[in-house]
Image (cartoon, rainbow, N blue to C red):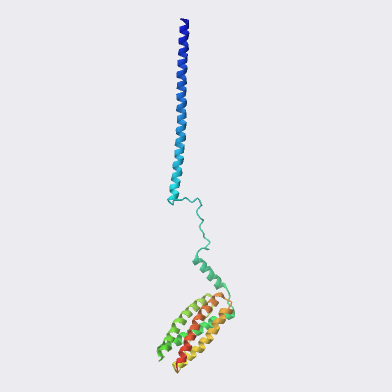
Amino acid sequence: MRFYGHLRGMLRNKYAGDCLGTLIDRKTMKYKFSINSAVRLGIIAIACVGLSGTALAQGGLTFDSKPYPTPDNSGKGSPAQGTAKSKSNTAGRKLSSADKAFIQDAAKGGMMEVAMGRVAEQNATDSEVKNFGGRMVKDHGKANDELKTLAKEENVQLPAEKQPGKWKSDKDYMGQMVKDHEKDLAAFEKEAKEGSDPDVKSFASKTSEVVRKHLEMAKKIDSKLK
């Protein structure tokens, strides 16, 4: 009887141990399962973030980490402010006596070309002479306006406009135009090369091309007149 009792005790202890082991194994498996599930969820989340970033990059949506630029209040990037500054510097320079004399002589000659051109446009008998007179009014009028602006910036007093002289015929007028434009061309080219003020030199260089064209026209028309 003791043997059987001892045997039942052993079997009961073994059964309890097996049950306890099974329970521990189940808890361990459950814990491992929980850890594996957490790892899988983490991997899935990382994969989703990576895919989202790739999709955003492919879709052209990017995020710039650079800071916003600081507004430039210095005026260096503004063309209008830069021009105003340049004009202010130009106005502050003192012209040489030669540059000043050129401006005054060019203004005097230009106003006379316009005045004589109006008379020729109205009173000339030859159609080419009439057209030449109109060309003088247009081209020299434009050059005079530019010269007035330049003289104002440089604080140069221009001479008053005078009445044009009289001529006997179209031939006389065109002969005088040839002489005047030869003299003017030499003066403009000299100023363009030897002038000291850059703005005055620029005006002389640009206008000399117009004066040269006028001289060629005047010679051609004059050669046809008798």
Whole-percent x and y of residue 216? 49, 86
User: Toward the viewer: 163 or 216?
Assistant: 216
* Residue at x-position 56% and y-position 80%: 191
Whole-percent x and y of residue 212? 50, 83
122 left or right, relative to 215: left
Quadrant in which the C terminus is drawn: bottom left
* Residue at x-position 45% and y-position 43%: 49
* Rendered view: 186 above or below 16: below
* Residue at x-position 47% and y-position 11%: 9
123 left or right, relative to 196: left
Q: Quadrant of residue 136?
A: bottom left
User: Toward the viewer: 219 or 167?
Assistant: 219
Whole-percent x and y of residue 90? 55, 72
Res. 208 in view: yes
* Residue at x-position 49% and y-position 90%: 176
* Rendered view: 83 above or below 106: above
Residue situated furthest top in the rendering: 1
Res. 112 in view: no
User: Toward the viewer: 176 or 110?
Assistant: 176
Whole-percent x and y of residue 77? 51, 63
Q: Quadrant of residue 48?
A: top left
